[in-house]
Amino acid sequence: MLLPVQRRYDYSPIINRPDYSWPEGKRLAVWIGTAIEVFAFQAGQGHDPFHHGAPQTQRNYAWRDYGYRVGLWRLLEIYDELGLPITAAVNSLAYDYYPEIFTALRQRHAAIVAHGRTNAERQTQMWEDDERHVIEMVRQTIARQEGRPPKGWLGVGVLESSHTADLLQELGYAYILDWPMDDQPVWLRTRQGRILSIPGPMEINDSGQILHRQANAAEFADMIVDQFEEMLRQSADQPLVFNLMLHPFISGQPFRLALLRRALQHIAGHATKERIWFTDPDRIAEHCQKLPPGIVPGS
């Protein structure tokens, strides 16, 4: 009996790959993502602060909404203080709910990554034609608001259907953040060509670590620093991508902010900054697209 297998990419041990560098000889690409999400009121899907899988109520809606009324603005203060580039993973419906946020993001030249329509729904539950419609609608909304379409996609819940990568490539997306199988970018096969997978938000993600695995604020801050330090050491041999994903209603809470600030200060002020490329996934994709065939796995 045969097991179902994925056919998007081939096995490739990182120790056997060609070496290359990021721009100006940098070795570790660092991008920090911030989720800008919309949830339905007392309906649909969403986190709860007390019980996993609890129904949607006014309590958990308001808890999540804190992130965009308060928490995000505290995170932006830290990014400004440290001069860190901003990557925003955006539900397209957020443009209707939080216009002031997008004014602030434009002022900071944030990279905008498409993040579905709303976190109250999952594409894994859609027919292919419905999913195509949603992906295209998200693309058109961001293009209309920002003056250009998004280059990248992060699935709601970091989830995909069996058609998502094909649809994204066919609708003009350049990269995807849903495949956490590597510390380097990898080209994925689709039915009409290829799309780049960039290492994205699975492990060093406040939602996964704090809400689901129940790490405390100090433990999460230590994870950030330990992940960064170890990847910086490993990047002497291979160029790598460090990613941190933050949700304002989680990391924007005051008692977590102090520890997060210290972790980001450690990264931003590191003694070996000449080896670190503070960037966003748009620029990582642009760099990979320019590399000769055979350098990035799958090319």
Image: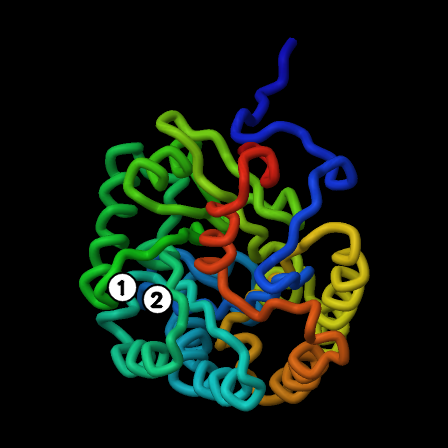
Q: Nearer the viewer, residue 156 or 17?
A: 17
> From what the image shows, is residue 238 above or below residue 275?
above
Residue hosting label 2: 38
Q: Residue at x 36, y 53 (%)?
A: 151
Q: Residue furthest top?
A: 1
Check the picture and name the quadrant holding the C terminus: top right
> From what the image shows, is residue 174 above or below residue 187?
below
Residue 4: quadrant of the picture = top right
Q: Residue at x 70, y 45 (%)?
A: 19
Callouts 1 and 2 close, C-beta under 8 Å: yes
> From what the image shows, is residue 172 above or below residue 40?
above
How many discs mark residues in the rendered view?
A: 2
Would residue 210 be found to the left or right of residue 219 on screen? Answer: left
Indicate which disc residue 283 carries: none
Dot 1 crowding, Cα within 10 Å, few <14, some 14–19, many 20+: some
Tag 1's secondary structure? loop
Q: Position of residue 44 (x, y in %)?
A: 36, 56
Q: Residue at x 50, y 53 (%)?
A: 287
Q: Residue at x 75, y 60 (%)?
A: 231
**What type is the residue that disc 1 sits on?**
Leu
**What type is the residue that disc 2 sits on?**
Val
Label whose residue precedes the other's in the sequence (1 or 2): 2
Residue hosting label 1: 93
Question: In this rendering, does residue 205 appear at all?
Answer: no
